[in-house]
Amino acid sequence: MVDEKKIALNPAYELSFLKKEEQTQLLDAMDSEQATPSLSQAQRLKKFSQEGRLSIDVMRAIMGEEKKSDLDKVTFTSDTLRKYFPKSYTPARMQETIMRVVAMMESSLQKIRTAT
């Protein structure tokens, strides 16, 4: 998963200490929660494992937590956006265009609110 950039190296290192069966269960928990562990989550999973208290329920609870980084950003894959932009557009140019469109929409909504 590290090679495929699905999980960062440091969390993966921490998870390497889990037993093979726990790692398999964690994959299920990650799939059901549609999340990969942050470093702090991976460290907690490792600690629970070392204490003999790691279960699928604990894994799902930890993986279901909302991460601070998830609250601070919105991301789109380039595949999602590419169909709306010329091939020559860089990700930075796509972002600039999206922000300009959002600003225009907000301006239009303000005019509608003021008119009513």
Image (cartoon, grey):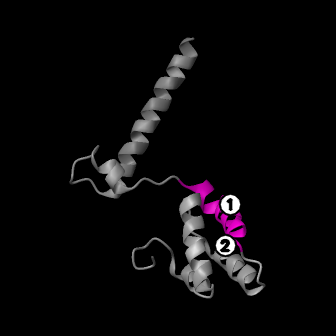
Q: Which residue is rendered at x = 57% and y = 84% of the image?
A: 20
Q: Is residue 41 above or below residue 100?
A: below
Q: Quadrant of the C terminus?
A: top right
Residue 39's spot in the image, x, y percent? 62, 76
Which structural element holds mark 2? helix
The part of the image, by quadrant, that contains residue 71 is bottom right
Q: Is residue 26 above or below residue 105?
A: below
**Does the rendering let one see residue 71?**
yes
Where is mark 2, residue-wise? 41
Q: Are marks 1 and 2 in contact (CB under 8 Å)?
A: yes
Q: CA distance from mark 1 to mark 2?
A: 9 Å
The part of the chain drawn in magenta is 55-73
What residue appears at the point 60 percent right and 70 percent down from the top-left corner? 37
Q: Main secondary structure of the magenta part?
A: helix
Q: Residue furthest front?
A: 21
Total numbered labels: 2
Q: Residue drawn 29% across and 43% down?
A: 84
- The percent position of residue 62, horizontal first and vertical second, equals 69, 66
Q: Is residue 82 left or right of residue 11?
A: left
Which amino acid, by three-letter code, is at mark 2? Answer: Gln
Question: Is residue 9 inside the magenta stretch?
Answer: no
Q: Secondary structure at mark 1?
A: loop
**In the rendered structure, which amino acid carries the disc numbered 1?**
Glu
**Crowding near the residue tagged with mark 1, few <14, some 14–19, many ≥20 C-alpha atoms within 10 Å:** few
- In the rendered view, would you say 53 is above or below 98? below
Location of the N terminus (image quadrant): bottom left
Q: Residue 35: x and y, percent?
A: 56, 63
Give the residue pinned by disc 1.
65
Residue appearing at x 45%, y 37% in the figure: 102
Decide which of tag 1 and tag 2 comes sooner along the chain. 2
Residue at the top extreme, as displayed: 116
